[in-house]
Amino acid sequence: MTRIEDLLAARYGAFAPQVKAELNPTLETLLSHRSVRQFTDENVTDDQLKLIIAAAQSASTSSSLQVCSVAIVNDKAKRERLAEVCGASGEFVRQAPVFMVWLIDFARAASILELQQIDTNTFDLIESTSLGFLDLGIASQNALLAAESLGLGGVYAGSLRNDVPSVIETLKLPKYVFPAFGLAIGHPDRAEKTSIKPRLPQAAVVHYDEYNPDAWADTVPGYDEEFAKYYAGQGVSNASWMRTLGKRLSNPEILHGRQQLRMHLEAQGFDSK
């Protein structure tokens, strides 16, 4: 029987918080999350997909604007083009039974405003851009959690932003629609070694009443050790979260084209002023 203590220990290692609580299905789904990049050839059923979409649409949405859409890509040629955009992440784009592209979608709203002869005077503000990304993140996380509750697994593909123009062309996206990221979903291949990845200790990320810029200092070195242990179990030696942070955030070229995001947003009508 899975215990809440076991899941917290898997998530935090030596820094696991001590809690007195009973494990319920929702918490078990949340605390058991892991990224799945290898899938069996078993299909995701139409009913499962409809429930996943229903869960996404049940997410909170700012002012009920509902500026999220999702493109489910089944066409093999289109899948291949998107896989090529994703580079090293492309294999799970090809393999997953379901591949979704999550879209910030103000085009629907623009058409409805046009029908009412109302001008679109706020679409180019950074608030609209931010709102779109936030709502999309909330909705897609609901979708992934729903998938996991159904015994499926998945992984996000931010690498879809490597070549935004190619994605726009592939999916025939009009103005005011922006492809934010992908999500692959399917039945996990049990041969894949991935397990629950450790997260930063709560002491490093939780602030009470005011921000403490030194909150991380006492715990991150120990977390780096937990991070290294996890990757050693995956067959990767000498892993370091702190070095990963430095590599990822210090060099724009490592973004493989994503550093040009503002230009691509502007081209789709999101000037983000």
Image (cartoon, rainbow, N blue to C red):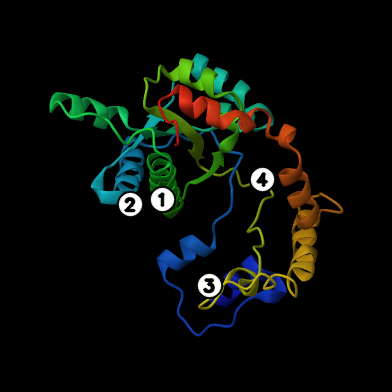
Instruction: Tell which tag, 3 or 1, sits nearer the viewer.
Output: 1
* Residue drawn at (42%, 39%) of the image: 129
Q: Which mark is residue 192?
A: 4
Q: On the image, numbered disc 1 is attached to which residue? A: 138
Q: Residues within 10 Å of mark 1 (few under 14, many from 20)?
A: some
How far is the residue under mark 4 from the one under mark 3?
22 Å
Q: Which residue carries the number 2 mark?
A: 59
N-terminal label among 4 and 3:
3
- Given this view, does label 1 or label 4 mark the residue nearer the observer? 1
Residue 51 screen position, x and y as percent: 31, 45
Name which residue lies at 37% across and 19% down: 174
Q: Earlier in the sequence, mark 3 or mark 1?
A: 3
Q: Is residue 238 left or right of residue 53?
A: right
Tell me, yes or no, whether the two marked residues, 1 and 2, touch with CB atoms within 8 Å.
yes
Q: Distance of mark 1 from mark 4, alpha carbons?
A: 27 Å
Report helix, strand or loop for mark 1.
helix
Q: Nearer the viewer, mark 4 or mark 3?
A: 4
Q: Type of residue at label 2?
A: Ala
